[in-house]
Amino acid sequence: MSKILVATEKPFAAVAVKGIREVVENAGMELALLEKYTDKAQLLDAMKDADALIIRSDKVDAAVLDAASNLKIVVRAGAGYDNVDLQAATAHKVCVMNTPGQNSNAVAELVFGLLVYGVRNFYSGTSGTELKGKKLGILAYGNVGRNVARIAKGFGMDIYAYDAFCPASAIEADGVKAVASAEELFRTCQIVSLHIPATAETKGSINFELMNAMPKGAIVVNTARKEVMDEAGLARMLEKRPDFKYVTDVMPAIHAELAEKYADRYFSTPKKMGAQTAEANINAGIAAAKQIVDFLVNGNEKFRVN
Ligand code: 3PG
């Protein structure tokens, strides 16, 4: 009997685990759960006899793959798979998938939670600003970016987007203005929301020059990955531009320093929570379980990323 391990340092809602269990057991497979683990050794131990693995931001490296001699597939229940060593997985003949789009509305809603908190001066009671009529720049027009655009329309924002891989015509078809570069997006928009993945090309790409080109009263919201931000550039931007705010769901390494110096212009959630809703957990978790069953039973490799 195939064994599917759900290993989540940050657990899914119980209702999502129930749904995953139903999919797995209805397929005649066994579900094992490792939630809230604190030590990599616990993960290595749990991997021993697993045929398939469902994870979130949990790190899967060569050591994890070495510990799992039966492993055939890893599904990252979510969008970004920068936490999985794809080369090592391929070398171990393990298929890696993600579940694109399943948690994107949850992340997009949090963008506005963070933005309203930011433009209203962190609910301090002082006079803030509104989102209506402001130019919003969406950097990368994928599943989350599209949902951000949809919600921004309700706020009456003037919406711009740049995506190196998505044709301008697809962006414009949504009633969003496509710009030619990230530089143009930052130069044009007072508010920029980051939705780029962490790759060799994007890491550290949001730098001082880019942010400093933003109009007065600038705010950057990052619900993507901390690695895309050039943290020295961010510190410099907060120092040089007293009008600038940074609100994020992905805590920078220099969080303590920024929180101490710029408590009125910098905010980070304590733990990444963009996708932490019952709906997103159910959507992504159940999609992951279904993809595994379909792979093990029918060999379906849709959503394979390695
Ligand atoms: C994703 O890439 O899907 C999001 O960043 C959510 O990540 P999480 O599952 O760790 O909350």
Image (cartoon, grey):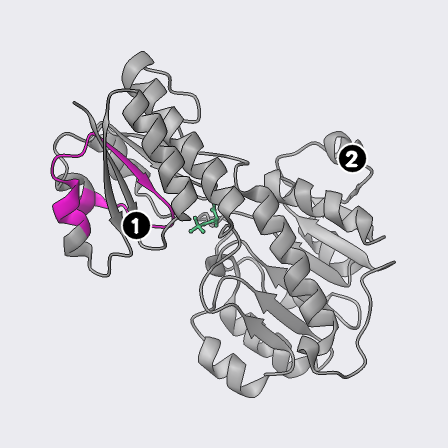
Disc 2 residue type?
A: Asp
**Residue in the foreground of this view, choosing between 4 and 220:** 4
> Looking at the rendering, which quadrant does residue 15 occupy?
top left
Of the 4 image quadrants, the one containing the C terminus is top left
Q: Residues within 10 Å of mark 1 (few under 14, many from 20)?
A: some
Residue 220 shows in this picture:
yes
- Residue 159, given in percent of the width and then of the height, sits at 80, 49
Q: Is mark 2 within 8 Å of ligand 1?
A: no
Label whose residue precedes the other's in the sequence (2 or 1): 1
Q: Magenta stretch: residue 67 in it?
A: no
Tell me, yes or no, whether the highlighted magenta stretch contains residue 61: yes
Q: Quadrant of the N terminus?
A: top left
Q: Is residue 67 above or below residue 187?
A: above
The kind of residue tagged 1 is Lys
Which residue is under mark 1?
59
Going by the image, does 72 lie left or right of 270?
Answer: left
Residue at point 69% right, 47% down?
148
Start-end of magenta stretch: 43-64
Rendered image: mark on residue 222? none
Q: Residue at x 19, y 25 (%)?
A: 2
Q: Who's the residue at 59% across and 83% down the image?
A: 263
Task: Give the percent coordinates (x, y) of residue 253.
Answer: 42, 71
SS label for mark 1? loop
Q: Position of residue 289 (x, y in %)?
A: 36, 30
The image position of residue 236, as x and y in percent, is 59, 78
Please tell me the numbered disc located at residue 174: 2
